[in-house]
Amino acid sequence: MSQTVTPELRRWIIEQAAAGFTPEVVLASMVASGWQEPVAVAALESTLREHLRNQAAAKPVVAVPEQAVASPGQGVPVPDLDLSLSPRQIDAGDRLVDVIATLSHPRVVVLGNLLSAEECDALIESARPHLARSLTVETKTGGEELNPDRTSSGMFFTRGQTPEVARIEARIARLVGWPLENGEGFQVLRYHPGAEYKPHYDYFDPAEPGTPTILKRGGQRVATLVMYLNEPARGGGTTFPDAGFEVAPMRGNAVFFSYDRPHPSTRTLHGGAPVIEGEKWVATKWLREREFV
Ligand code: PD2
Ligand code: ZN
C-alpha cells in the first residue's frame, strides 16, 4: 500500500526537529505509528533538507552548510549540488553545467554539458593506450581482481595527472561542494558491444574482510559521478533498478549519485546496461569521506 507524505506530516516533522528530537527519534515514532520505514526516511530527509535550505535562504550568512548536514540514521555528510532554488544551470567555476533531472531517493542528479567535446576526446585519447580489462577492488582482500560482471576495459588516472584532468577535478569539487583531495583519480572505461557492468553498489561492503584496508585510504565512498565521453548508438545506459530509472549516455553529460551509508537503503544499486551498438566511454569519479591518499 502506498503512503502519501502530506504537508501536515512535513509540518509535524519540522516541529519535532525544532523541539529537539533527533531524526532517529522522529523516524522511530513515525514507524511506530504505521509509516513504512523507507517512506518515513525519505519524508524526513526531504523535509529537513528543505527546511534547512529555507532557513539558509532567509539568512544573509549561511550558518550550517546544507551539504554538511548528516541525514537520519547512520548517515554521514555527503557531497551534493546546490539545487535549493531549482536552477537550470550551476556555476562550476569555469563552466555552467545544466541540471537535467533530479531524484531524491536515491539521490541522483543528471547533468548536461559538464565536459566539452574537446575534453571528452582528450580524456579518451589519453586513456586509450593504457586500457586493460577492468578490475574491481576485491573486498575479500583489499586487492584487485578481474570481475566477470564487468566486461569493459579501463584505466585509472592519478589525481591531477594532466592539466586537463586537474581542471575537470576542480570543476567537480566546486560543483558538488566536496574537497578535491577527497576524490579518487578518474577511472576511464571503454565498453564494446555486449559489454556491461552488472548492477552493484559503489560503496565498500562493511561485511567484507578486505574493507578495513580499503577504508584506510580516505574512508568510504560517499558519491559517484559517471561522465559520458561519447555516445553509443544503442544501449549502454546507466540504470538504477531500485528507482526504475535509466540515464542515457550523452557526450559531455554525467550522472551524479550519493550514498550517506554503505547500505542498500540508499537505493543506489546501479549498473551499466549492455552496449548494443557502437562503443561507450565513461570517466568515473568516486568521492570519499576524507582525503584519498
Ligand atoms: O558505465 C556506467 O554506466 C557505469 C555503471 C555503473 C559505471 C559505473 N557503475 C562505475 O564506474 O561505478
Ligand atoms: Zn558503479
Image (spheres, grey):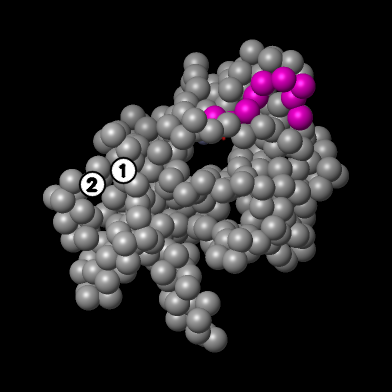
Crowd class of label 1 (few under 14; some 14 to 19; many from 20; radius 10 Å): few
Q: Image point 26% across, 54% down: which residue?
A: 73
Residue 237 part of the magenta segment? yes
Residue 130 vertical placement versus 79 (above, below): above
Kind of residue at disc 2:
Trp
Nearer to the camera, 75 or 145: 75
Q: Is residue 53 above or below residue 60?
A: above
User: Which quarter of the figure has residue 280?
Assistant: top right
> What's the amino acid at mark 1?
Gln
Q: Which secondary structure, mark 2?
A: loop
Nearest to the observer: residue 130 or residue 91: 91
Q: Nearer the viewer, mark 2 or mark 1?
A: 1
Lateral position of residue 67 relative to residue 247, left or right? left
Q: Position of residue 215 (x, y in %)?
A: 38, 47
> From which residue to which does the magenta span run?
231-239
Task: From the image, tell me which residue sits under label 1.
Answer: 3
Q: Quadrant of residue 170?
A: bottom right
- Left or right position of 76 against 253: left
Q: Would residue 196 be visible to someone looking at this image?
A: yes
The residue carrying mark 2 has its beta carbon less than 8 Å from ligand 2: no
Give the residue number, with chain letter if any, for mark 2: 35
Cβ–Cβ under 8 Å for marks 2 and 1: yes
- 248 horizontally vs 135: left or right: right
As drawn, which residue projects farthest toward the right? 118
Residue appearing at x 22%, y 75% in the figure:
19
The response on whether ligand 2 sits within 8 Å of label 1 is no
Q: Is residue 27 above or below residue 247?
A: below
